[in-house]
Amino acid sequence: MLQRGLHPSSESRRVVQGLLFISPWLIGFLIFAVYPIAASAFYSFTQYDVLTSPKFVGFANYAELLTRDETMRVVTQNTFWWVGIAVPLGVAVAFLLANFLNAEIWGRSAFRAIFFIPSIIPAVVATLVWQWVLNPQYGLIDGYLASLGLRIIPFLGSPLLSKPTLTLVHCWAQGSAIVIFLAALQDVPRTLYEAALVDGANAWHRFWRITVPLCTPAMLFLLVTGLIGGFQNFTFPWLLTQGGPARSTEFYSIYLYRNAFMYFKMGYASALAWLLFLLVVVVTVLVFRSSARWAYYGSSE
Amino acid sequence: MTGLGASSAGDPSAEVPALAQGEMAYQARRTRVRQVMGRVLMYCLLIVIAATFLLPIAWMLSSSLKYDAQVYTIPPSFIPRPVRLANYPEALAYLPWGTYLYNTMVRYALPSVVGVLLSCSVVAYGFSRLQWRGRDVLFFVCIATMMIPYQVTMIPLFILYKRLGWVNTYLPLTVIAFFGSPYLIFMFRQFFLGIPSELSDAARIDGCSEMGILVRIIVPLAKPAYAVAALFQFMYVWHDYLGPLIYLSKKDLRVVAIGLAFMRDQLFFRAAQGQSYPYLMAMASVFAVPIILLFFLAQRTFIEGVALTGLKG
């Protein structure tokens, strides 16, 4: 398949050709990735409000972020809560539902469609509807509770319940994860299950010894992409609660947005962004490292 | 049979005495009953969960057909009595949705999808159908950029676009599509890798250039991948809230997503002016239903696309 060339320039010709083909991405990479990353690193050492030119302040932004910023503490706690609880929960729920769908049930594609649709509804619509469903006076749930004389549940109004409520909505939107798990489940060779049956394994065994291990690559993929997305979680909390109540849903990306586009503290926001970058890289690497112990790549298609 | 709810009955041999056979038949019946009960339980669970998943959507549709007063009743009712169809034309007249739709489809979606299809397939060709030193390293870099939180690049890019005078135009949102999107490059690459290399080899022997191979052989074979990419990019554009929020502040530049959010803010301010929630729900339905319809029409494409990126490699 390779064009054999003993002449040294044939390899370099192929490299040039390859680079030419990927040049749209390569140029884009330089303009939209390398430059902004370098620039934001630069801005993070300045105070910059876009109207006047940047003022160099050294590590002042970082120092303030890490020591004196009270909101930062709250924000980081919230974000770690989200990434540590909501994201894995979403993956687990998706896995569970995919297993249900994978059993040979009648109407499987209808159920699959129903589970998938919430994930393609635009966030603006979804948040609008959920706000109404969770409305403490006239919402679907609290309305019934009130009419029965029971105490209402302040889903989005209580600092304690706001994050779990967001998690619920998050799990509701896991359609694409369910689909990925479904495909992974269907890749598990039936012969393994048959062999296990012959050996007398019950459903619990079969699930934990065959299904789960063979789905760990998909789990790793969804966990990593979920974590990366979770750190950047903006639209849903912004539209549902605007970071409230009492900053209980003020996530990292919301705080960043505020600093950049509401307070116009671009330098500070850039420092925030770099810390976020660091966090994402560290957590991703940790997850990958740990995956050597629990991800199983034994079976190939 | 997989996962929950399946087990097998024994296979009674003909040489087993009658008493033991009866016992085995009894056990087999019990297992079957357990099987059936397990299935019924699972169906019930599935139906309950599916109903929960559909609840918000059903609520949205039913609220969109209600009179304002009925929205605020306790206990809440699902069935609008009477049905108020007028909510839809009135909500549509509330804001210039025609303009918003035009903005979303023609000024944003169209260039974005075209740009992505052109750039990602060409780049993916370079990453998959050609062998050259450094190829896989650069591909890894490409994928790694997906890890960069958008917040890191968002601010310098905004400042850059401001200096270029591109703020309040669609350029920041569309130009970037012509430089490839790692997610779609990844997807195209996986797909291209599946095309047999003999096809390329034969064409090369016949003197075809690489560009020619891409255009004449790969592209026709890759129609499903193009369909998936177009679908995903369209959905990304349709959903995009933050992008237009940052770059487009002028009223007549709004996309549908921003329009809906704006409408919500407006109506919350003037909640006393009746029909606010039904209008919002009507607009929400109008916004969401095309996507749902699109999904039902292109169901397989959607699902294949999601699975394609999720698994291999």
Image (spheres, rainbow, N blue to C red):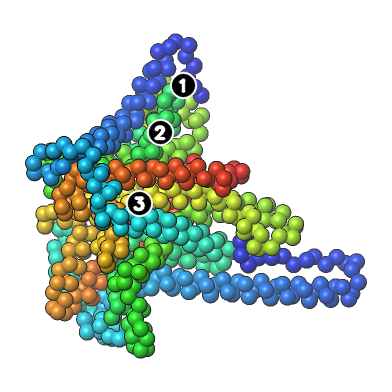
Report if the CB atoms under discs 1 and 2 are less than 8 Å apart.
no
Confirm whether residue A196 shows in the render.
yes
Query: In front of the other: label 2 or label 3?
Result: 3
- Is B33 left or right of B268, judged from the image as shown? right
Quick check: A47 above or below B288? above
Q: Which residue is mark 3?
A: A231
Mark 3, residues whose alpha carbon is within 10 Å: few (<14), some, or many (≥20)?
Answer: many
Nearer to the camera, B289 or A248: A248
Give the x, y percent position of residue B279: 21, 73
Residue underneath mark 1? B205
Closer mark to the observer between disc 1 and disc 2: 2
- The circle on residue B81 is none
Callout 3: chain: A
For the residues marked 2 and 3, what is the alpha-carbon distance in whole angstroms?
24 Å
Respond whether the residues carrying marks 1 and 3 are from the same subunit: no
Q: Is residue A101 above or below residue B228?
A: below
The 10 Å Cα crowd at callout 1, few under 14, some 14 to 19, many 20 or more, is few
Question: Which residue in the structure is indicated by mark 2?
Answer: B139
Q: What residue is at 44 percent from the left and 42 percent from the top?
A: A285
Write the residue at 35% across / 69% down.
Answer: A160
Name which residue lies at 35% across and 26% down: A19
Secondary structure at badge 2 equals: helix
As measured in the structure, the alpha-carbon distance from the residue carrying label 1 to the one carrying label 3 is: 50 Å
Query: Which subunit holds the residue at mark 2?
Result: B
Residues A211 and A293: in front is A293
* Residue type (three-letter) at the residue carrying disc 1: Ile
Q: Earlier in the sequence, mark 1 or mark 2?
A: 2
On what subunit does the disc labeled 1 rest? B
Q: Are marks 2 and 3 on the same chain?
A: no
List the single residue furthest toward the left: A52
Dot 3: what SS?
Answer: helix
Q: CA distance from mark 1 to mark 2?
A: 27 Å
